[in-house]
Image: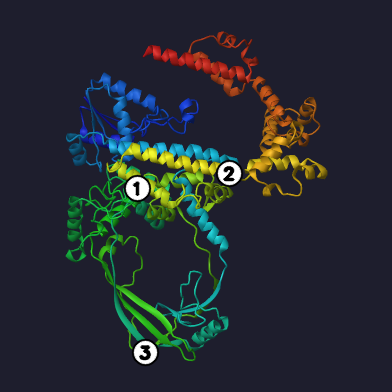
C-alpha cells in the first residue's frame, strides 16, 4: 500500500479515482504545523526567536487546530495497512512546500517519503508526477519561513504599539493596503463638486453630443485633473440655447466623415488577480466567492492551479484549444496567441501556468450553476487568447445645426468580424453589426429621433476602491502575492478597519486613525527613504522573498538584515511616540480633570488643553497626582455595560446590590483597576460562579455519567455537592472538565 497526502478532501476524492487500488489518498486539511499561536503556549507570545549567525531561527512549530488528531488518524491507518511509501502532494507553491516540509518531518518514520506536485489534477498529470518524485525545494520553504518570521515580528511589535490608540492590530501587508483605501477617502473628502452642462440627442440610433469648447478656448471645461471635456460647458445659458435649437430644428446636417477601423485584441488567460477582478465585473461576485468556487473547480480537476501571476500556458493546451477553434469557428478565428511570453515584470514570480481549463475541448464543466458560470468565464478567456482580433468599422461624424455656432459630434461603429468575442457571445449582448440605413453622405439631413436632453450635473468625487480594484492596485505596486490577496482584504473587514457598502470599501474611524495617526510613526520621511508601511518598502520585501524562493538570495542574511532594519524603525517609532501623549493617557487625564473644581484643574494643567501637552508632561502630571485623584475617575462604558449585563443575568436588584457595596448610584462608581466599578464587577462574577448550574450544564453531567455508567451521586461528591440540584455553575464546570478527562482516558485505553 502507498499513501498520498493532499491538502483538501475534495482533491483527494478526485485523485483517488485516478490511482485506484493499492493507494490510500487522504487530506491533511491545509497547514498542520505553524508558528505557535495558541495563547496557552508560552512561545506564542514571542515576537521572534534567536538564531546563530548564518542560520534562520528554529521556532517550536506547533500543531494547528485539529491537525494533530487528523495526522494521528492518517498515520495510524497507514501503518495498519502496511504503507511503506508516502507521497506528499500539497499545492505547488510556497505555502504548499512549507506544508510538505512539516509533513515530511511528521512522517519521517515511514520507509520512504517523497514530494510530488502537479499544476492540474488530471490523470496524466497525477500519474506523471508520482512517477517522477522530487526533493523538497528548501528555497521555497525558507521563503515561507522568512515570510512567517517577518509577519510575526511586525505583527506583534506594531500591534502592541497601536493598542495605545485602542486599535487591534497592524500587519506587514494589511496596513499598506488599508492606506490605499484611506487615502482614497481623503481624496473624496477634499473633492469640490464642479458644475457642468451637456446636451445630447439620438439620430438613427447614434448618440450625438454638442461640442461646446476646444481645449485652447479660454472657457474650455476641464476636470480636477486638468482633463478636457469638449462636450461640457460651465455656461448654462449656452447649453440651454443649444438644447432649444436642437429641439426646434429636429434635424442636423452631416458636414464631414472620418473613416476608420478598430481592431480589439483578446486578453491573455487569467491570473489570480484578473480572474477575481473579471468575476466581480462580469458575474457580480465577491472575491471570496470567486476564490471558493475556483478552488472547487481546481480540486475537481476542471482547471489548473488558481494561485498564479503568470499568463503563459503550455503548448499542448494551446494546440488543443486552437484545434477546437478551427473546427468550430473556422481558420479566420485563429489568432497569433497572447500571453505566451515569460516573466517580464519584477513583481511577477511566473511559477505556474495561467488559470485555464485542464481539458480545453470541454466547454461546460462543474456541478452547480455557479461552478458552471465561473468555468465558462475561464474557458472563454483561455479560448479567446488564441483567437483573432475582433474588428469594427468606425465613422466619426460631424454635424451642424441651424443657429448653433458649434458642431455636434457622434460616432457610428459596427462589428464586421467577431473574432475572440465569439466565445463571449453569452456576455456581449446587442452588438451592432450593420451601419445605419441612412448611409454617410455629406450634406444629408439626419432627423433627431427623440427630444434632445439637457444635463446639468456636478462632478463626482473619485470612486472608492472595490474588492477587485484594490487587488488591481496591490498587484500594480507589488503588495502581496496571489495567495494573499483575498485574505488581506478579508482581514481589513474582519478587524473593523474597513466597511463594505455594496462593492465599495470604506475606511472606518479606526481605519483612518491607524493610517493617519499610527502608521506615520513608522514612515518617518525625515529618517528613512521608505518607511516600514510604505508601498515601496513592502514591495521590496516581497521581491526579496521571491529571490529567496528562486535561490538567488540567502534567507538567513536577509532575515538578519530585516531584523536590524525593523529594530531601528521600531525604536524610532517608540521614541517619537513618547513625545506625544497617547489616546489612553489623554482620556485618562481628561477623566480625572472632569471631576476636579476649576481651581484644582488650573493648578494641575494651567490654561493648556490636554491635547496640547507633550507625552512627558502628561506622564509627569499623572505620576504627580495622588492615588485619591487617580481613583476618582468615572467608570468606562465597558465597565458599566459589564455590571448591567451581570445584574441582568443574576436577576438581582441593582440598587440593592450597590447599597450593599456602599454606593448610592451606578454613576457614583469610580473607574480604573482599583476603582469601585472594578470591585463591583468582581463581586458580581463571584455571585455568578456560585449561582445554580444552568439546565445545559445539568443535562451534560447526566449524559456524561450515563455514558460512563457512573452513579451521579459519586460524580457530584467529587465537588463536595450534596445533590445535582444544588450544584453551582463553577462546580458544574469543574465536574464537566473532570468527566471529559475520564471519558478520553477510557477511549485511549480501549485503543
Residue 444 marker? 3
Mark drawn on residue 661 = none
Which image quarter is the C terminus in? top left
Q: For mark 1, what is the residue? A: 543
Badge 2 or badge 3: first in the primary sequence: 3
Q: Residue 613's x, y, as percent? A: 68, 47
Which-is-in-front pick, marks 3 and 1? 1
Q: Please determine whether, in this image, residue 253 is positioned above or below residue 95.
A: below
Q: CA distance from mark 3 to mark 1?
A: 62 Å
Q: Residue at x 22, y 33 (%)?
A: 135
Which mark is drawn over residue 577? 2
How much space separates mark 2 and mark 1, taking CA atoms? 31 Å
Q: Position of residue 161 (x, y in %)?
A: 54, 40
Q: Is residue 481 visible?
A: no
Q: Nearer the viewer, residue 68 or 481?
A: 481
Considering the image in quadrants, where does the N terminus appear? top left
From the viewer's side, name the closer residue of 103 and 616: 616
* Residue at mark 2 to residue at mark 3: CA–CA distance: 74 Å
Query: Foreground: 420 or 431?
Result: 420
Amino acid at each position: 500500500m502507498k499513501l498520498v497526502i493532499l491538502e483538501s478532501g475534495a482533491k483527494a476524492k478526485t485523485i483517488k479515482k485516478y490511482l485506484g487500488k493499492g493507494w490510500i489518498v487522504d487530506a491533511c486539511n491545509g497547514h498542520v504545523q505553524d508558528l505557535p499561536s495558541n495563547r496557552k503556549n508560552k512561545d506564542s507570545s514571542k515576537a521572534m526567536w534567536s538564531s546563530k549567525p548564518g542560520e534562520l531561527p528554529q521556532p517550536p512549530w506547533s500543531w494547528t487546530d485539529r491537525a494533530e488528531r487528523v495526522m494521528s488518524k492518517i498515520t495510524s491507518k497507514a501503518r495498519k495497512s502496511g504503507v511503506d511509501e508516502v507521497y506528499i502532494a500539497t499545492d505547488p507553491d510556497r505555502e504548499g512546500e512549507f506544508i510538505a516540509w512539516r509533513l515530511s518531518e511528521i512522517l519521517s518514520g515511514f520507509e520512504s517519503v517523497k514530494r510530488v506536485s502537479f499544476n492540474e489534477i488530471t490523470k496524466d498529470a497525477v500519474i506523471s508526477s508520482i512517477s517522477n518524485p522530487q526533493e523538497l525545494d528548501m528555497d521555497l520553504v525558507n521563503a515561507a519561513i522568512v515570510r512567517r518570521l517577518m509577519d510575526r515580528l511586525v505583527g506583534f511589535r506594531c500591534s502592541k504599539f497601536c493598542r495605545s490608540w485602542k486599535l487591534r492590530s497592524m500587519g506587514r501587508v494589511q496596513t499598506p493596503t488599508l492606506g490605499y483605501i484611506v487615502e482614497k477617502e481623503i481624496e473624496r473628502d477634499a473633492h469640490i463638486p464642479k458644475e457642468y452642462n451637456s446636451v445630447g440627442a439620438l439620430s438613427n440610433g447614434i448618440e450625438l453630443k454638442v461640442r461646446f469648447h476646444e481645449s485652447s478656448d479660454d472657457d474650455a471645461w476641464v476636470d480636477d485633473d486638468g482633463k478636457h471635456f469638449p462636450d461640457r460647458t460651465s455656461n448654462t445659458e449656452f447649453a440651454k440655447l443649444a438644447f432649444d435649437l436642437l429641439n426646434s430644428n429636429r434635424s442636423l446636417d452631416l458636414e464631414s466623415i472620418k473613416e476608420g477601423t478598430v481592431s480589439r485584441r483578446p486578453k491573455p488567460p487569467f491570473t489570480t488577480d484578473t480572474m477575481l477582478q473579471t468575476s466581480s465585473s462580469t458575474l457580480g461576485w465577491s472575491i471570496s466567492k470567486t476564490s471558493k468556487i475556483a478552488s472547487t473547480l481546481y480540486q475537481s480537476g476542471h482547471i489548473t492551479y488558481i494561485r498564479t501571476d503568470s499568463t503563459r500556458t503550455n503548448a499542448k493546451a494551446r494546440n488543443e484549444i486552437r484545434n477546437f477553434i478551427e473546427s468550430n469557428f473556422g481558420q479566420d478565428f485563429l489568432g497569433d496567441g497572447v500571453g505566451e511570453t515569460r516573466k517580464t515584470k519584477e513583481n511577477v514570480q511566473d511559477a505556474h501556468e495561467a488559470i485555464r481549463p485542464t481539458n480545453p475541448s470541454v466547454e461546460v464543466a462543474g456541478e452547480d450553476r455557479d461552478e458552471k458560470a465561473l468555468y465558462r468565464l475561464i474557458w472563454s478567456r483561455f479560448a479567446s487568447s488564441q483567437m483573432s482580433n475582433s474588428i469594427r468599422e468606425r465613422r466619426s461624424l460631424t454635424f451642424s445645426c441651424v443657429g448653433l455656432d458649434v458642431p455636434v459630434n457622434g460616432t457610428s461603429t459596427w462589428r464586421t468580424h467577431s473574432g475572440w468575442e465569439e466565445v463571449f457571445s453569452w456576455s456581449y449582448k446587442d452588438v451592432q453589426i450593420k451601419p445605419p440605413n441612412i448611409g454617410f453622405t455629406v450634406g444629408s439631413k439626419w432627423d433627431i429621433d427623440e427630444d434632445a436632453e439637457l444635463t446639468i450635473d456636478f462632478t463626482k468625487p473619485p470612486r472608492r476602491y472595490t474588492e477587485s480594484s484594490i487587488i488591481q492596485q496591490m498587484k500594480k505596486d507589488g503588495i502581496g502575492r496571489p495567495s494573499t490577496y483575498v485574505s488581506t482584504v478579508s482581514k481589513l473587514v474582519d478587524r473593523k478597519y474597513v466597511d463594505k457598502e455594496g462593492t465599495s470599501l470604506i475606511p472606518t474611524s479606526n481605519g483612518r486613525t491607524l493610517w493617519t495617526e499610527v502608521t506615520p510613526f513608522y514612515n518617518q520621511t525625515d529618517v528613512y527613504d521608505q518607511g516600514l508601511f510604505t508601498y515601496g518598502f513592502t514591495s521590496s520585501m516581497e521581491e526579496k522573498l521571491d529571490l529567496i524562493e528562486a535561490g538567488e538570495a540567502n534567507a538567513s542574511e536577509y532575515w538578519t538584515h530585516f531584523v536590524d532594519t525593523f529594530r531601528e524603525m521600531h525604536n524610532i517609532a517608540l521614541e517619537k511616540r513618547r513625545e506625544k501623549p497617547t489616546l489612553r493617557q489623554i482620556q485618562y487625564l481628561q477623566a480625572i480633570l472632569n471631576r476636579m473644581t476649576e481651581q484644582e484643574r488650573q493648578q494641575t494643567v494651567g490654561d493648556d488643553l490636554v491635547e496640547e501637552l507633550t507625552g512627558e508632561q502628561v506622564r509627569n502630571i499623572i505620576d504627580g497626582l495622588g492615588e485619591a485623584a487617580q481613583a476618582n475617575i468615572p467608570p468606562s462604558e465597558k465597565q458599566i455595560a459589564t455590571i448591567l449585563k451581570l445584574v441582568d443575568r443574576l436577576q438581582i436588584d441593582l440598587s440593592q446590590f450597590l447599597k450593599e457595596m456602599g454606593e448610592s448610584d451606578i454613576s457614583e462608581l469610580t473607574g480604573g483597576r482599583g476603582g469601585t466599578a472594578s470591585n463591583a464587577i468582581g463581586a458580581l462574577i463571584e455571585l455568578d460562579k456560585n449561582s445554580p448550574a444552568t439546565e445545559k450544564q445539568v443535562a451534560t453531567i447526566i449524559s456524561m455519567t450515563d455514558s460512563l455508567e457512573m452513579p451521579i451521586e459519586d460524580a457530584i461528591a467529587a465537588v463536595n455537592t450534596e445533590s445535582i440540584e444544588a450544584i453551582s455553575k463553577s462546580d458544574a464546570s469543574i465536574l464537566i472538565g473532570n468527566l471529559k478527562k475520564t471519558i478520553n482516558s477510557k477511549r485511549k485505553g480501549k485503543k
